[in-house]
Image: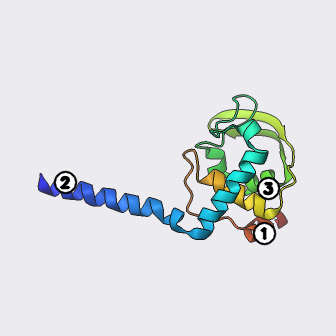
């Protein structure tokens, strides 16, 4: 019984240390904080405070399989807007997202914010340099 307890405690410690690593990255932490401001100013009206969007109109960002599987397309969409059909979490959306006029740093920051909220979990820091490279493809 003691062995099981020790294994459980060790597992919890390992998991909690791993999950806090990305938040310990000061650059990522700062980008997420800036991204929250961008989200509040440009994204919240359609995608909502909880990232769940509006079913049938605006796709969810929360627990989004689309973001996970189409990160570059998502970054391009954040920068340039999107139109046409996309499928998110098994539901099809066909609407227009207009460009918001964000610079590459704002795109990187809001992407980092989205990728680290509402059940999304990313260890990767998206930078403005990476956004620039993606936009050139």
Which residue is depicted at the point 77% across and 47% down?
A: 41
Badge 2: how crowded within 10 Å, few (<14), some, or many (20+)?
few
Badge 3: how crowded within 10 Å, few (<14), some, or many (20+)?
some
Q: N-terminal of the two: label 2 or label 1?
A: 2
Is 109 left, or right, of 50 in this rendering? Answer: right
Q: Is residue 54 above or below residue 26?
A: above
| Secondary element type, mark 1 | helix
Q: N-terminal of the two: label 2 or label 3?
A: 2
Q: N-terminal of the two: label 1 or label 3?
A: 3
Q: Is residue 27 above or below residue 12?
A: below
Badge 1: how crowded within 10 Å, few (<14), some, or many (20+)?
few
Task: Examine the rendering and report whether any part of residue 71 can be seen.
Answer: no
Query: Which labelled disc corresponds to residue 76?
Result: 3
Task: Examine the rendering and report whether any part of residue 33 can be seen.
Answer: yes
Residue 45, picture quadrant: top right
| Secondary element type, mark 2 | helix
Q: Is residue 52 above or below residue 1?
A: above
Q: CA distance from mark 1 to mark 3?
A: 11 Å
Label 2 sits on residue: 5
Which residue is depicted at the point 75% across and 52% down?
A: 38
- In front: 96, or 117? 117
Residue 33 in the image: state x and y as whole percent: 65, 58
Which residue is depicted at the point 69% across and 29% down?
A: 55
Residue 71 in the image: state x and y as whole percent: 69, 55
Label 1 sits on residue: 133
Q: Nearer the viewer, mark 2 or mark 3?
A: 2
């Amino acid at each position: 019984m003691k062995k099981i307890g020790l294994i459980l405690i060790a597992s919890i410690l390992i998991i909690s240390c791993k999950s806090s690593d990305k938040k310990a990255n000061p650059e990522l932490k700062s980008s997420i904080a800036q991204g929250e401001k961008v989200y509040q100013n440009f994204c919240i009206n359609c995608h909502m405070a909880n990232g769940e969007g509006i079913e049938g109109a605006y796709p969810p960002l929360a627990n989004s399989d689309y973001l996970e599987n189409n990160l570059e397309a998502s970054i391009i969409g954040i920068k340039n807007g999107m139109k046409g059909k996309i499928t998110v979490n098994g539901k099809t959306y066909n609407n227009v997202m207009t460009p918001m006029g964000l610079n590459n740093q704002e795109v990187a920051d809001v992407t980092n914010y989205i990728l680290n909220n509402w059940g999304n979990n990313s260890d990767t820091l998206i930078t403005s340099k990476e956004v620039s490279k993606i936009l050139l493809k």
